[in-house]
């Protein structure tokens, strides 16, 4: 069997959690392959709402095996809080969730370093989630990170060495963290013990064995392609490879094992944190998108910047990921609009281009196509047969521009508000 990958094509928060949950019944295993608690994946069903950060979104349907892969960075304390809240809500995970021994740990001092580096950047700050993601991945690449497997032997000495190194850096840059280390360290160390209640595995062996046995795996991306360390709007990116290739390194599966690549996008576009965003709206329309789309960060509560859909960036993301099927989210947010805009090209120094440039900066001016809105509430629709003509036109326009079929349309946050198109052609 193959690993199907679901990943974000924009700047994150496309609705990955919702769709992983919807697709879970079709898979045996769901695995996260990168990112960490910077992610906030929202799921709504049967009147309940859950926001997952480190735990894969395949935990709610049918007792499937879930895995946190080696490419993830995990904060034991945040993980414990997340897992205990789920257990309290009736979702006990110790038997169903396994963690790779090669997953890197986010130390309390990584969070302090994240804050210190952001403070040092002043106006040029990235606007990180403050979860220590960048410093944890930096230690991984710098070959001085600590991994989940390390907690099984000789952890204390390694932890002290890492902590002392981080404290020296914080001291050298003059960052005053007061009592913030003492405040969380004890709980953090206790949470390490809590991790041991879960199966700690060599996930690359386990996943490849599953594939040999004919089991199907769904890999859940975090963040989005425009936040990818290599291909995103660098340096305003996260510190992992969010693209499809990240699934190979983050789970230990060969490229030949990748099956479908599901690319997920919003019918418009949002971004949280700093960095370029060519189609951003600063007017009433932007406010309307924010209000109707309830665009506030699920982890930080920060207001998300909103704008029109950017097809130049989407085409780039589709190409890099080898997307085979598209999933469009939140089109219901546009239900009442008279007119919808879609950026089809960029104008840079007077020249139009449909190709994504080396960097997107103030010189990039979006060129828009305008489409009529459908002006019909769609949230209760159950089949694509009910779609208004103008909405079908929007779908056809996007498919022509993007060159990949739109397979799923999401019409609201609830699991049930999901329409799978052309089911007979699967
Ligand atoms: P993720 O990080 O990609 O999983 O996405 P988030 O959970 O951070 O953000 C998506 C937000 O949109 C969440 O609040 C979802 O409940 C909500 N959502 C998902 N799909 C839809 C949809 O089709 N319509 C509307 N209105 N909201 C949606
Ligand atoms: P999900 O998985 C949206 C953004 C941050 C910041 C940049 C770097 O829910 O889609 P980091 O803390 O990773 O060092 O921050 O990336 N960012 C996200 N934006 N959704 C996310 O995750 C994000 N994870 C990180 O706002 O701009
Ligand atoms: Mg999110």
Image: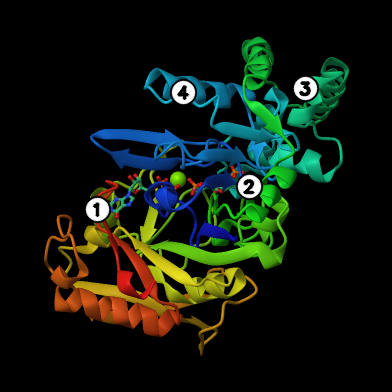
Mark 3 or mark 2, earlier in chain: 2
- Contact flag, marks 1 and 2 (Cβ < 8 Å): no
User: What's the mark number on residue 298?
Assistant: none
* Residue 395 percent location from the top left of the image: 30, 76
1 vs 2, front mark: 1
**Which residue is disc 3 drawn over?**
151
State which quarter of the image contains the N terminus: bottom right
Q: Is residue 331 left or right of residue 119?
A: left
Q: Dot 4 lies on which element?
A: loop
Mark 2 CB within 8 Å of ligand 2: no
Q: Dot 1 lies on which element?
A: loop
Residue 187, by quadrant, is top right
Instruction: Name the residue rendered at 38%, 69% in the picture.
Output: 309
How packed mark 1 is, by other alpha carbons closer than 10 Å (few <14, some 14-19, many 20 or more), is some
The answer to whether residue 261 is above or below residue 28 is below
Q: Is residue 292 left or right of residue 180?
A: left
Mark 4 or mark 1, earlier in chain: 4
Q: What is the C-alpha distance between the residues marked 4 and 3?
A: 23 Å
User: What's the mark number on residue 34?
Assistant: 2
Say which of 263 and 216 sits in front: 216
**Which residue is disc 4 drawn over?**
92
């Amino acid at each position: 069997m193959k690993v199907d990958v679901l990943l974000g094509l924009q700047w994150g928060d496309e609705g990955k959690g919702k769709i992983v949950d919807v697709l879970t019944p079709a898979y045996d295993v769901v695995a996260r392959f990168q990112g960490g608690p910077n992610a906030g994946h929202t799921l709504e069903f049967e009147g309940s709402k859950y926001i997952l950060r480190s735990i894969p979104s395949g935990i709610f349907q049918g007792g499937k095996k879930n895995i946190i892969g080696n490419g993830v960075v995990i904060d034991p304390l945040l993980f414990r809080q997340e897992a205990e809240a789920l257990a309290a809500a009736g979702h006990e995970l110790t038997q169903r969730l396994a963690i790779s021994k090669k997953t890197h740990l986010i130390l309390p001092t990584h969070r302090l370093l994240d804050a210190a580096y952001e403070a040092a950047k002043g106006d040029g700050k990235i606007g990180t989630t403050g979860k220590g993601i960048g410093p944890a991945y930096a230690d991984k690449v710098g070959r001085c990170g600590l991994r989940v497997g390390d907690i099984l032997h000789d952890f204390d000495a390694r932890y002290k060495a890492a902590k002392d190194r981080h404290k020296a850096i914080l001291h050298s840059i003059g960052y005053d963290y007061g009592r913030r280390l003492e405040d969380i360290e004890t709980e953090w160390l206790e949470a390490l013990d809590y991790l041991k209640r879960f199966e700690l595995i060599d996930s690359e062996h386990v996943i490849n064995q599953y594939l040999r046995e004919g089991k199907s795996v769904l890999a859940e991306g975090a963040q989005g392609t425009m936040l990818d360390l290599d291909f995103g709007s660098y340096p305003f990116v996260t510190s992992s490879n969010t693209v499809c290739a990240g699934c190979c390194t983050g789970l230990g599966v060969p490229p030949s094992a990748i099956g479908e690549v599901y690319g997920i996008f919003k019918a418009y576009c949002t971004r949280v944190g700093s960095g370029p965003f060519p189609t951003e709206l600063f007017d009433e329309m932007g406010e309307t998108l924010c209000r109707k789309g309830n665009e506030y960060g699920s982890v930080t509560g920060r207001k998300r910047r909103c704008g029109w859909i950017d097809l130049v960036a989407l085409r780039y993301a589709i190409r890099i990921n080898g997307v085979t099927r598209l999933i469009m989210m939140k089109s219901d947010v546009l239900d009442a609009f008279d007119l919808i805009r879609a950026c089809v090209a960029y104008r840079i120094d007077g020249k139009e281009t449909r190709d994504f440039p080396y960097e997107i900066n103030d010189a990039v001016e979006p060129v828009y196509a305008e489409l009529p809105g459908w002006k019909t509430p769609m949230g209760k629709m159950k089949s694509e047969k009910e779609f208004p003509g103008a909405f079908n036109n929007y779908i056809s326009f996007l498919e022509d521009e993007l060159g990949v079929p739109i397979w799923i349309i999401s019409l609201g946050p609830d699991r049930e508000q999901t329409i799978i198109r052309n089911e007979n052609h699967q």
